[in-house]
């Protein structure tokens, strides 16, 4: 396997750019959230972004998360000749929608931590967290300054993402989920919205439809690759680095690109993992540790890294068509080739390595 690791030598520059994106969109996000009526929904939103702590005290933080989507909007617009200021509303909009998805996901998955601290639903209740997410989605699609067509593109992508999330939840009660079905779900849940994010950045630059479509597809594929890396971290992530407990995918019998591949593996380990999943009851700590060992034994992690590499090569070919100037597309390539190095940076010592 030849794994693309082109971000390894640019990691500090990439980290600086993500931090700059967070800093640039923070005022836009604050202004948007401040338009919400005073109350629990607004406070839950402010808490999610890291601006206040669980007691409502200001933290001085620019917010949690990596702001990859905001950076993608800004970098896409810049690569196509637009100034960053023209893309700030769109960059903030995609982060508001990302907040909607994560506030909702944490409730659906009962994940108790996010960005290294208590998830919003554990502080403000599940209904309030869900309503906060819905409010942020509405703010995103009506944010002043969005380019023509952006609300439609983002709204459609969000609807597709919800369908993917529903399929993801439904898979938990099935024992017959195939890898292709899981791939379709992943494209819907994680790929389509990232693709729309790049498309909105292109719209900010006034790009023609062909270029927009190429960038949408490139980063839809990138979204799948990122989710595959996240699925790997669900098995081999280091909680001290990810800010989330590891093993919840396995303990909750989740069907991910990694676990479905392991379940289908024609080996004793694959069959033993299938037996654990067939019980349809959440796994305890000892069973989760056993399930991790079984996934390791199927070599599903190595195949996941191979899959990410193939997707990365496809992404780079699409970017070459969309942005012929190598210098102009360099930052986009850095984001597109992140999944492998992203996984490596957050994985524990048991996880497979490129």
Image: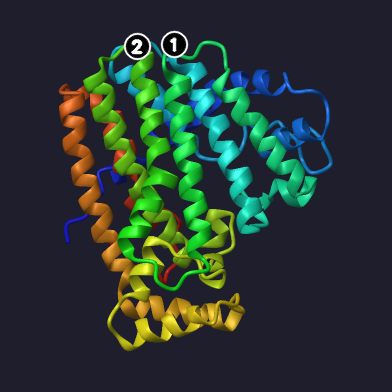
The answer to whether residue 172 is above or below residue 77 is below
Residue at 48% of width from left, 24% of height from top? 91
> Quarter-wise, where is residue 150 in the image?
top left
Frontmost residue, 225 versus 271:
271
* Tag of residue 277: none
In the image, 168: left or right of 309? Answer: right
Q: Position of residue 133 (x, y in %)?
A: 65, 37
Note whether residue 90 is visible.
yes
**What secondary structure is marked by label 2?**
loop
Q: Are marks 1 and 2 in contact (CB under 8 Å)?
A: yes
Q: How many residues crowd around disc 2 within 10 Å: few (fewer than 14), some, or many (20 or more)?
A: many
Kindly identify the residue that appears in the image at 34 percent across and 55 percent down: 183
Quadrant (top left/top right/bottom left/bottom right) for the C terminus: bottom left
What residue is shown at x 19% (from left), y 43% (from top)? 314
> Mark 2 — residue?
82
What kind of element bears circle 1? helix
């Amino acid at each position: 396997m030849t794994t693309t690791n082109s971000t390894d030598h640019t990691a500090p520059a990439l980290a600086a750019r993500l931090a700059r994106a967070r800093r640039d969109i923070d005022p836009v996000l604050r202004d948007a959230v401040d338009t919400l009526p005073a109350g629990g929904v607004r406070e839950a939103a402010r808490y999610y972004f890291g601006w206040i702590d669980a007691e409502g005290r200001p933290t001085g933080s620019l917010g949690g998360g990596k702001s990859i989507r905001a950076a993608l909007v800004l970098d896409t617009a810049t690569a196509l000749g637009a100034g960053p200021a023209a893309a700030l509303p769109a960059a903030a909009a995609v982060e508001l929608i990302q907040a909607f998805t994560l506030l909702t996901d944490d409730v659906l998955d009962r994940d108790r931590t996010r960005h290294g601290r208590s998830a919003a639903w554990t502080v403000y209740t599940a209904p309030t967290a869900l309503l906060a997410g819905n409010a942020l989605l509405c703010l995103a699609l009506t944010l002043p300054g969005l380019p023509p067509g952006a609300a439609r593109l983002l709204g459609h992508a969000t609807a597709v993402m919800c369908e993917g999330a529903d399929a993801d939840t439904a898979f938990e009660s099935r024992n017959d989920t195939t890898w292709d079905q899981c791939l379709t779900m992943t494209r819907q849940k994680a790929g389509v919205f990232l693709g729309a994010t790049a498309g909105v950045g292109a719209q900010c630059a006034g790009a023609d439809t062909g270029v927009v479509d190429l960038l949408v597809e490139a980063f839809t594929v990138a979204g799948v690759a990122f989710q595959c890396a996240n699925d790997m971290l669900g098995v081999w992530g280091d909680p001290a680095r990810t800010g989330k407990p590891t093993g919840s995918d396995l303990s909750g019998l989740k069907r991910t690109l990694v676990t479905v591949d392991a379940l289908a593996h024609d080996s004793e380990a694959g069959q033993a993992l299938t037996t654990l999943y067939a019980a349809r009851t959440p796994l305890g700590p000892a069973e989760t540790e056993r399930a991790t060992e079984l996934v390791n034994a199927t070599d599903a992690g190595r195949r996941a890294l191979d899959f990410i590499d193939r997707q990365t090569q496809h992404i780079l070919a699409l970017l070459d068509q969309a942005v012929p100037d190598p210098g102009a597309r360099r930052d986009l390539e850095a984001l597109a080739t992140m999944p492998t190095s992203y996984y490596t940076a957050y994985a524990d010592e048991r996880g497979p390595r490129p």
